[in-house]
Amino acid sequence: MKQLFAYFFQRQALAWSAAIFWTLGIFYGCSMPGKELPKLHLFDQFDKVVHFTFFFMFAFLWQTVFAKKYYAVWWSIGIAFLYGVGIEIYQKYCVAGRSFDLWDICADTVGALCILFVLKNKK
């Protein structure tokens, strides 16, 4: 994991590209109408695991973009939270077959917060 951080930190253009690509990928996935979503139900609330994973990576990638700033971690977590809320509002009003889900926001936020544990163990 330490090598992965070093790789991204040293290649700022790659970090920006990956973060923007991931952000757009989340938006694309969340813009799919409900009936077009893949039917992958391994267990109840599987979609929360997907939200957790997507927003963990979101926070990780944006944190690497601003890694040299003292506020990088908290900024990436805050932006992940706001992006998650924005996506849920967008889904409620603009995407057929989708709705606002507070538990999705919770999963997004917990996923983003987990970046703190990864960074703490990195040192």
Image (cartoon, rainbow, N blue to C red):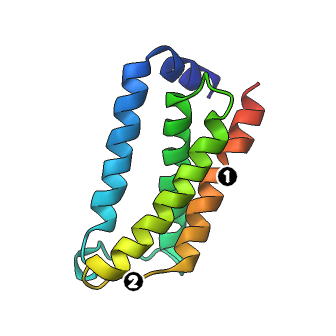
Local SS, label 1: helix
- Residue drawn 24% across and 77% down? 33
The image quadrant that residue 60 belongs to is: top right
Q: Is residue 121 visible?
A: yes
Q: Considering depth in this image, is 76 or 6 the residue closer to the camera?
A: 76
Kind of residue at disc 1: Leu
> Which residue corresponds to mark 1?
113
Percent position of residue 110, x then y: 65, 60
- Screen quadrant of the N terminus: top right
User: Does 9 sit above or below residue 27?
Assistant: above
Question: Residues under labels 2 and 1: Cα distance?
Answer: 24 Å
Kind of residue at disc 2: Ser
Q: Considering depth in this image, is 116 or 70 the residue closer to the camera?
A: 70
> Which residue corresponds to mark 2?
99
Q: Residues within 10 Å of mark 2 (few under 14, many from 20)?
A: some
The image quadrant that residue 15 belongs to is: top left
- Residue drawn 65% across and 38% down? 73
Query: As drawn, is 3 to the left or to the right of 31?
Result: right
Q: Residue furthest top?
A: 10
Percent position of residue 39, x then y: 32, 77
User: Does 11 sit above or below residue 20?
Assistant: above
- Residue drawn 39% across and 30% down? 16
Percent position of residue 34, x then y: 29, 80
- Screen quadrant of the C terminus: top right
The image quadrant that residue 97 belongs to is: bottom left
Local SS, label 2: loop
Percent position of residue 25, x then y: 32, 51
Identify the mark at residue 64; answer none if there is no mark. Answer: none
Badge 2 or badge 1: first in the primary sequence: 2
Query: As drawn, is 16 to the left or to the right of 115?
Result: left
- Residue drawn 43% across and 72% down? 88
